[in-house]
Amino acid sequence: MFAYLVRRLFLMLVTLFGISVVIFFLLRIVPGNIVDILFAAAGYVDPADKANLEKELGIDQPLVVQYWHWISGFLRGDFGYSYVSEKPALQEILPRIPITAQLAGLALLFSASIGIPLGVISAVKQGTRLDYALRVVSLSGLSLPSFWLGLLVLTASVAMFGQMPLFNPNPQSFGEAVATYCIPAMVVGFRSSALTMRITRSSMLEVLRQDYIRTARAKGASDAAVNYQHALKNAILPVITVIGIEAAFLIGGLIVTETVFNIPGVARFLVEAIRWRDYPIVQNLVMLIAVVVVSANFIVDMLYAVFDPRIRYTD
Amino acid sequence: MRSVRALAATAALSLLAFSTIALAGGPKQGGILRMYHRDSPGNASIHEGATYSLNVPFMPVFNNLVIYKQDVAQNSMDTIVPELAESWAWVNDNKTLTFKLRQGVKWHDGKPFTSADVKCTFDMLMGKSQQKFRQNPRKSWYDQVSDVSTNGDLEVSFNLKRPQPSLLALLASGYTPVYPCHVSPGDMRTHPIGTGPFRFVEFKANESIKLTRNPDYWREGRPYLDGIEFTIIPNRSTAILAFVAGKFDMTFPTHITIPLLKDVKSQAANAVCKVEPTNVSTNIIVNSTAPPFDNIEIRRAMAMSLDRKAFVSILFEGQADIGGTMLPAPNGLWGMPKEMLESIPGYGPDVNANREEARKLMQKAGYGPDKHLAVKVSTRNLAEYRDPAVILIDQLKSIYIDGELDVVETANWFPKVARKDYMLGLNLTGNAVDDPDQSFYENYSCGSERNYTNYCNKDIEKLFEVQSQETDVAKRKKLVWDIDKKLQEDVARPIIFHARAGTCWQPYVKGVTVMSNSSYNGYRYEDVWLDK
């Protein structure tokens, strides 16, 4: 188990180094930089002013030097200054992380708490009307783009209640707090709950056909015990994998949802920073996200080993 | 006894007068104006930007020397009123503009405002001071100012190289606030200090901008509001839905397109909406330094193929204006008369006849039904640029020009235009001040940074100078019309239309005036109040 852990940890560090190089150089490949955008906003380009500003921001230096400055700063916890707001990048990023983290956490919770039970029910009731209905719901979850679903929810709430759940950093009531976080979380989690449900269903169907399930039933175990204690326990591995992958994909969904619901989280902030070519924000934020995603995968790998002893012994 | 009765009568009359004012709906103090903002401005320094995304939230923080009267929709010389100045006078054969400054004005940090602050601001704008702006997009506005001198703490003079009556108009723009000497340009980008009716509280990028009432404001009784809060909502659908749901008292100014206005009115029937010209023209920039558009005949043919009414009816349901460089009347002060406009090739009402003429010019240049000219029509990747570009491509087909849309990201647009890496471009030009000096010098003067097409005509340049010095408005107007006509005939930058847009507010918001010939100058908000 220890060797497995060390090897995974090493792979994690190599992956993060690779990601840092890719982030840094991809950003530089994208045409235009912050100075181009600032001058574009002002409607003119003055070559001398442009050169001065590039020098002031340090983007006139060789790429290797820029990379070294960034990555060494990142490792020291010095994230530099945002080109746009001229405030410390960390000061810009940190307050936004809890907002997105809460949304992502709620979305995953919604996804798992809806997707897994419904997947089990759908598998157990295979071929019934309920199964068909649940499959239609899951298919619609996979088909509906979250920006459209978000706008639909907003439009419906304005049309039906004359109100809309727009983000408020200081909610006045419990209801407002629920609306602020839960509705966007449900919108973004709807897709992953559909995926979780489909994976749970197919995995359960496979397990339910196994001999040991028949044996359990023959021994007189109740339906609930068979489905949830014997079958689900063995069908859960692919579901955990999918939830782990979905955690990474969630960022994409959150960008859209944060924009539609006007939530000042990191996902929307990242898109704005890319638009402004605000390198210190984009690089550090993407790197932080990469650390989270790679760590999540690492934890999933560890959970595999915990749930399936064969992995820790053979790998 | 008699005096007691007199006192009682006076008190009763005062009470009656007060209640009459209250019943008549006189301005009320208090309340926070909630508005959404369309975009997160890059910084908070008006002098370093060229978008009204900056003016709207930060103009209330500042004062100018003079300002366009905030409750009159049409900006003109007659509506300029003193602000930090108490009065002004033209002296020395109209070559010196002297301002007497207001006494006792304080910056928001408590320091006194003096003539030194005015000198600092304009020295920096002219590039003459040690401290520099990171960007200085309106430096050319002060080309005719040789220096700014002070006479004590309360008098300042702008000494000009030659008379320029329009300087006063430029000084009255929302783009011309006075900055404090003691705050660096860097600090002004993040935490602006002004003398205006509202103090800056915070600016959270992509989130919100907050202003609070300045209790020491020099204008007694103003502002009425306790503060203004801007929530930044880049998604237009979300923003408008939030306004409809009553989350905001006001939309971002001129943010509602004409087609969207119907939606707003149908969902919020009580909302007050006003449509006004924005003084932003949609135009074509032509690279006349390279074939095929180095040929004036082809440029003329292209200009004659335009069906401007089609643009206006498709994009604005008929609510936009057709004109030359200057915004047309009645909102614009300097637009050509209709007859003069229609005498310009391509502006005549018979589009088919214009296009027939254009096809002849194309055939003369070697193109025809069997030999089409392939061009790329470059434009920014924004809806207000893309949509007219698509219509333009469709219209060019009628004169054997096959256009291909080349969508360019904002970051690359101006560098691309600056290095002349385009054939045809669809562009938007905003005018902060409805004055020919601002428009002509900025967009058509030889060597100007914003003269993207490098159009340079020395004869016209001389006329620019003549009109700029003319103090008789009627005479100047005629000169301006002639120049504008010549610019259109030269296909310097064919103007397609001048846009209009809507602003909406809830019925309890009072004292809002939407400017009708500029979208940069009307955001002091000291007269706005909430009837709640």
Image (cartoon, rainbow, N blue to C red):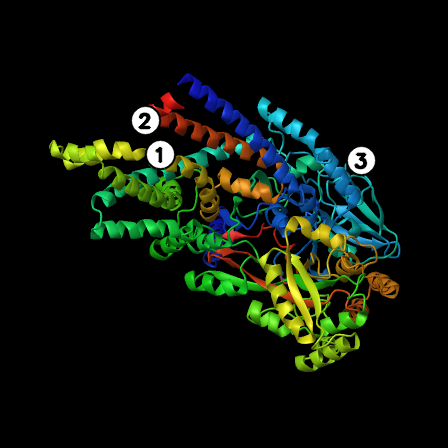
Residue at x 67% of width, y 79% of height:
B351
Along the viewing direction, whichever of A155 and A228 lies nearer the viewer: A228
How far apart, in angstroms, are the residues tagged by discs 1 and 3? Answer: 62 Å
Residue B53 located left or right of residue B299: left
**Percent of width and height locating residue B396:** 67, 71
- Dots 2 and 1 on the same chain: yes
Q: Quadrant of the C terminus of chain A?
A: top left
* Chain for numbered disc 2: A
* Chain for numbered disc 3: B
Q: Residues within 10 Å of mark 3 (few under 14, many from 20)?
A: few
Q: Dot 3 corresponds to which residue?
A: B130
- Judged from this view, the residue extending furthest toward the top is A2
Determine whether the residue tagged by mark 3 lies in a helix, strand or loop.
loop
Residue B363 located left or right of residue A292: right
**Percent of width and height locating residue A222:** 13, 34
Task: Residue A120: name its quadrant.
Answer: top left
Vertical order, B270 against B248 (above or below): below
Q: Dot 1 corresponds to which residue?
A: A240
Along the viewing direction, whichever of A102 and A133 lies nearer the viewer: A133
**Which numbered disc covers residue A307?**
2
Along the viewing direction, whichever of B473 and B125 lies nearer the viewer: B125
Task: Residue B162: name its quadrant.
Answer: bottom right
Q: Answer whether labels 2 and 1 touch (C-beta < 8 Å).
A: yes
Determine whether the residue tagged by mark 1 lies in a helix, strand or loop.
helix
- Identified by mark 2, the residue type is Phe
Vertical order, A161 against B362 (above or below): above
- Identified by mark 3, the residue type is Gln
